[in-house]
Image: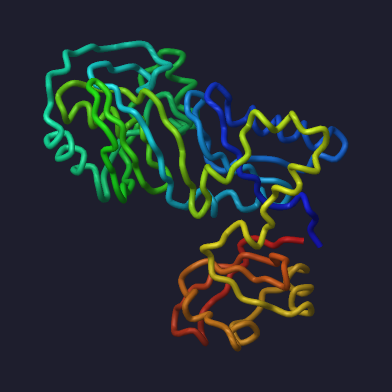
Amino acid sequence: MGNSADGILLIDKCEGETSYGVVRKVKSAFGKWKAPKVGHAGTLDPFASGLLIILVGQGTKLSSYIMAGKKVYQAIVRLGVETDTLDPTGQVVKKSKVPDIKPAYITKKAQTFVGEIEQTPPVFSAVRYKGTRAYKLARMGVEINLERKKVTVFSLRIISIDLPDIAIEVTCSSGTYIRSLAHDLGRELGTGAHLRSLRRLASGSFKAYNALSSREILRKSNDSCLRKGIIPLRDALPAMGEIEVNSILTGKVRNGYRPRWEEIAADSSLVDCVDDYIKLVCGDELVAIMKAKNSEGVSHGELRIERVFS
């Protein structure tokens, strides 16, 4: 049932690498003949660094749940220069003089971006536009009008101000573009801006300081060090509620059976998991992720199997 190569790896991606490049390095480190399926949860642009959660084996089934977690970033916003990509890799499209802006004014403007906000994704992004990735169309010079979308910025802290640069720390919801945030802040300050640098400090419960540098992946003589670093499936979603089930029910669920409320609700805090995802676990193993939907009270609720783990 499962194996040591099922779970997630915490990698600190270095600047200049692509997220897919890190995935390829992990596959290579496992070896050609024993490499499990490998993916990642949440792309980091090549110019960015920080926490990249690598999904290994059955861990690839956890992608949407891990990506849904809050993100924490440190960034430097460069005022006075706008680029077509909204970051340092693009072409400069506008320059403006940066006056001596008072720190209190910058802080006040920055706080207007805290809470639920609307932002337009960068045209150089993986968002689909009429069925095609936006960045592919942008590279061809096709005019793109992406729809604004709602995201949540839980906090935006000014770390330091050394004009034209502003260092910030942002805690935000999944799907938030820090490039767009930097661009919009620059417009709000009247100078324009782009995102000069970006580092992801955390994703959900996981932190970059606990991660293995991407430079170290291929320096290992074999895959044993990587396997030791894999966080097991059960522990990969620490914020999700869980319910212990016995081995008999485990086997039935893995064979396609959908348990009833009364089969798993006894001696559990299932009521606290209503209208949310829950993990079914047996010992150290993750058996399944289910959606608990309460329609007429717990005893009449519905359980829907989302993912099953062998």
* 168 with respect to 215 (left or right): left
- Residue at the (70%, 40%) spot, across then down: 38
- Quarter of the image where one finds residue 143: top left
Asked if residue 82 is positioned above or below residue 48 in the image, the reply reads: above
- Residue at the (57%, 83%) spot, across then down: 268
- Residue at the (42%, 18%) spot, across then down: 138
Report x, y in % for residue 283: 73, 72
- Quarter of the image where one finds residue 195: top left
Counting labels gives: 0
Report x, y in % for residue 64: 55, 51
* 108 with respect to 156 (left or right): left
Quarter holding the N terminus?
A: bottom right
Query: Coloring scheme of the render?
Result: rainbow
* 279 with respect to 193 (left or right): right
- Please tell me which residue lies in front, 228 or 137: 228
Asked if residue 182 is positioned above or below residue 282 in the image, the reply reads: above
Report x, y in % for residue 183: 28, 27
Quarter holding the C terminus?
A: bottom right
- Please tell me which residue lies in front, 216 or 303: 216
Asked if residue 162 is positioned above or below residue 90 in the image, the reply reads: below
Report x, y in % for residue 271: 48, 81
